[in-house]
Amino acid sequence: MPSGFNYPSSRRLRRHGPVGYANYTSYRPWLRDEFTFRCLYCLNREQWGRVQGMFDLDHFTPQCIEPEKREDYDNLVYACHSCNLTKGDQKCPDPSSVLTSDQVIVHADGALEALTQEAERLIRILDLDDEECRAWRRIMIRIIELAEERDQELDKQLMGFPDDLPDLSRLRPPGGNTRPDGIRESYFEVRRYGELPATY
Ligand SMILES: [Zn+2]
């Protein structure tokens, strides 16, 4: 897989479980950390552009279908504005279990190859393999390759973590946290222990 476009090798389980915020936007720091500062669908990273306005909190099951899940953390995912807009109110297969390296191959020319029907369906719903998305992926792959070869600093910027990692240990969700052990695995804590990799 080209650098920057490695879908995870297996289904991801949630590390965090904040509960009870009155407004779903309060979950943003948790979701940034949960999804490693990138769009769950297309893997676009905060480090690749302007963060302001570029990332949304997507209701995986659309609000119009299950409005009672509007403030449910487990129904929220971190997604770039473009993917969130394309998805709209459509229901789709769960990307946490479908967008994995054994079900989706990313080619160096930016094309995606789905190895399962569910992955194919999700890619189609999200337009992840349309010409515009392919072209964007192709450019990013080339930029990252050039940075790897010629500019280590740029490579670290593109492939590293953002500086403003959220300190989740200081947050107090009104209804508590069903997965408190996840705090130790948050990237802020990992950095505090000196264990944060330079790139991911
Ligand atoms: Zn995206």
Image (tube, grey):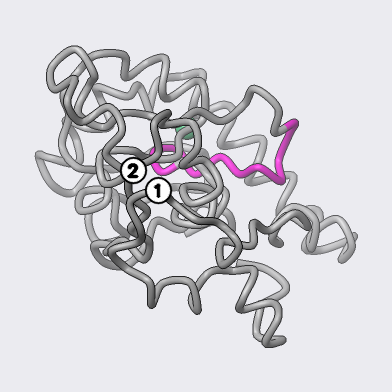
Do the numbered discs 2 and 1 sit on residues whose CB atoms are within 8 Å? yes
Total marks placed: 2
Is residue 173 covered in magenta?
no
Secondary element at image label 1: loop
Chain-order first, disc 2 or disc 1: 2
Q: Residue at x 26, y 32 (%)?
A: 60
- Give the main secondary structure, helix, strand or loop, of the magenta stretch: loop
Left or right: where does residue 171 sit relative to residue 174? right
Q: Quadrant of the C terminus?
A: bottom right
Q: Position of residue 146 (x, y in %)?
A: 79, 53
Q: Position of residue 98 (x, y in %)?
A: 21, 49
Residue wearing tag 2: 20
Query: In the picture shown, does residue 29 fall above or below 25?
Result: below
Q: Residue at x 18, y 49 (%)?
A: 115
Query: In the picture shown, does residue 2 fall above or below 42?
Result: below
Q: Position of residue 179 (x, y in %)?
A: 32, 68
**Crowding at label 2, few (<14), some or many (≥20) Cα neighbours within 10 Å?**
some
Q: Quadrant of residue 91?
A: top left
Q: Quadrant of residue 149?
A: bottom right
Residue wearing tag 1: 174
Left or right: where does residue 168 sit relative to residue 46? left
Query: In the picture shown, does residue 2 fall above or below 122?
Result: below
Secondary element at image label 2: loop
